[in-house]
Image (cartoon, rainbow, N blue to C red):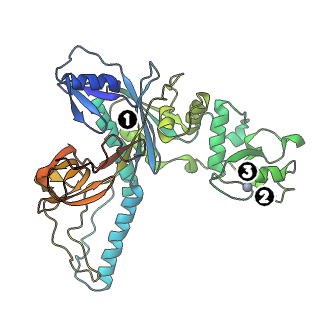
Amino acid sequence: MSYVFVVDQERKPLDPVHPARARYLLTSGHAAVLRRYPFTIMLKESKPDVVPAPLRVKIDPGSKTTGIAVVNDATGQVVWAAELEHRGQQVKKNLEDRRASRRSRRQRHTRYRSARFDNRHRSDGWLPPSLESRISNVLTWVERLQHWVPIAALSQELVRFDTQIMQNPEISGVEYQQGTLAGYELREYLLEKWERRCAYCGQQNRPLQIEHIIPKARSGSDQVSNLTLACESCNQKKGTQTAAEFGFPDLHKQAHKPLKDAAAVNTSRWALYRRLQATGLPVEVGSGGLTKWNRSQRAIPKTHWLDAACVGASTPESLRWQQVGPLAIKATGWQRRQMCLMDAYGFPRTRAKEHSRVHGFKTGDLVKAVVMTGAKAGTYVGKVAVRATGSFTITTPAGTIQGIHSRYCQPLHRGDGYSYAIGGASSPCLKPGVSAPNV
Ligand SMILES: [Zn+2]
C-alpha cells in the first residue's frame, strides 16, 4: 500500500505515514480525513518545529499514461505512486466533432455564427490542445502534490537516449556492449533509428533483438553502423548470412545514415520540462536508456509507475517498492462548452444548460447515499449525475441507480476533473455499491 499524506492544522505538509499509523491517528481523534484520493489526513494541531524529510517527485511522461512516483532518496522508499491516464485522444475527437458539426451547418445554410475577423495569433510555445491537456494533467498533479507532500526536487524522463554519450555514434564509432549503461542508451538509439520494428519483416510490437548486419562470425564489428534490430524468427533465419545475402542489399547503406536529431526530440516532453522548471524546484532529467538501466539493475518489473521511480541518476541504490499499490488516476475533464444538444438537422434538441451545481452537488462528485425506506432502500456509493429536479443518478460499481434525491446524499470526494481507482479495480476501498437494505 502507499503511504498516507499528512498535513498539519496550518496545512503544512509533513512526513507521509504508514496506513496503520494513519488509522491510529484517525481513530484516536488526533486527525481528520482531508481528502480521499490521494488519501490525506489533517492533524488537529500545528507542528511549526517539525522539519519533514525532503521527497522527490519522479515523472515518466507518456502519450497515453504518465507514471508518477514520490520517492525518499535517503531511504529508497517509494512513498506513493500513481499512473495518470490522459485524455489527449478524447480532446482531439471532441475538436474534430465540433469542426465537423460547424462545417455541416455552413454547408447546409443552416443558421450559424459567421467566422469572426481573424486577428488571432498563436502565442509562443503554443501546443495542440491534445498535447496541452497532457502537460496540464502532469503539472496539475505536481502542484497538487506540493500541497500534501514536502517536495524538494523533481525528476523527469526527458529524452529517449542520452545525446552526450551518443554524439554522432555512426561517425564517432561507439561500440555496443550488452549490459552497460552505454549499451542501454545505444539500444534506445537503435529503437528510435529503426522505428521500433524488425528491419527484415517490418513487424512492430514484438520483442526485438540487436542484430549484426555483417555477422560477428564473419568478423562484423560491434559498431552502431553494423547494428540493426530484428525479431527472433528473422534473426534465426538470417543466421550467419550478411544482410545482402539475406536479400536486403540496401540495409548497410541505411545503417550508415545517422539518426536525424529531430526524430529524438519530443516537443511535449520539452514543454513539460520548461514548465516544471517554472515551479522553482530543481528538475533532474534522465534518458529512457538510463531508466531502463536503473530498472534492470534493480530487477524491477516494467510498469509506468516503476519506470517513473527509476528515472534519473538520483535513483537510490535499493528502491523499496514492493508494498506500494499505485493509484490509477484518469483525466475525465470537467464539462462541455456546447450550450445544448442538436438534432440531426442542426436544431436545438435540449434546453440551454442550467446551473451545474444542484443542492450543493455537481456531476462527477463521489457521494454516499443512504436510503432508509421505500423501493430504493439501500446504501449506494458512486459518482453522481445531478438533475435540476434534485433527483440524482448514481453510478455504482454494481450498476446505475436513478431517482435518488439529493437529501439522501453525502459528499465523499468532490469532482476534481479526475476519476480514481486503486490497483486498477474500481475503488475497492469503498463498499460495493448496493448493500442490504438498511432499515
Ligand atoms: Zn522480423
x 34%, y 41%: residue: 139
Image spot of residue 216 (x, y percent):
84, 40
Could you give the CA–CA distance between mark 3 and mark 1, rounded to whole angstroms?
Answer: 39 Å
Secondary structure beneath dot 2 equals: loop
217 on left or right of 183: right
Residue, disc 3: 230
Residue, disc 1: 277
**Which of the two discs, 3 and 1, sits closer to the camera?**
3
Between discs 3 and 1, the one toward the N terminus: 3
Secondary structure beneath dot 3 equals: strand
60 on left or right of 398: right
Dot label at residue 250: 2
Image spot of residue 3 (x, y percent):
36, 28
Question: Looking at this view, is 391 or 99 the one in front?
Answer: 391
Could you give the CA–CA distance between mark 1 and mark 2, rounded to whole angstroms?
Answer: 44 Å
Could you give the CA–CA distance between mark 2 and mark 3, rounded to whole angstroms?
Answer: 15 Å
Question: Looking at this view, is 383 or 64 the one in front?
Answer: 383
Between discs 2 and 3, the one toward the N terminus: 3
Residue, far right: 218
Q: Is mark 3 within 8 Å of ligand 1?
A: yes
Q: Amino acid at mark 1?
A: Gln
Image spot of residue 214 (x, y percent):
83, 46
Which quarter of the figure has residue 348?
bottom left
The crowding category of the residue bearing disc 1, from other C-alpha atoms within 10 Å (few below 14, some 14 to 19, many at least 20), is few
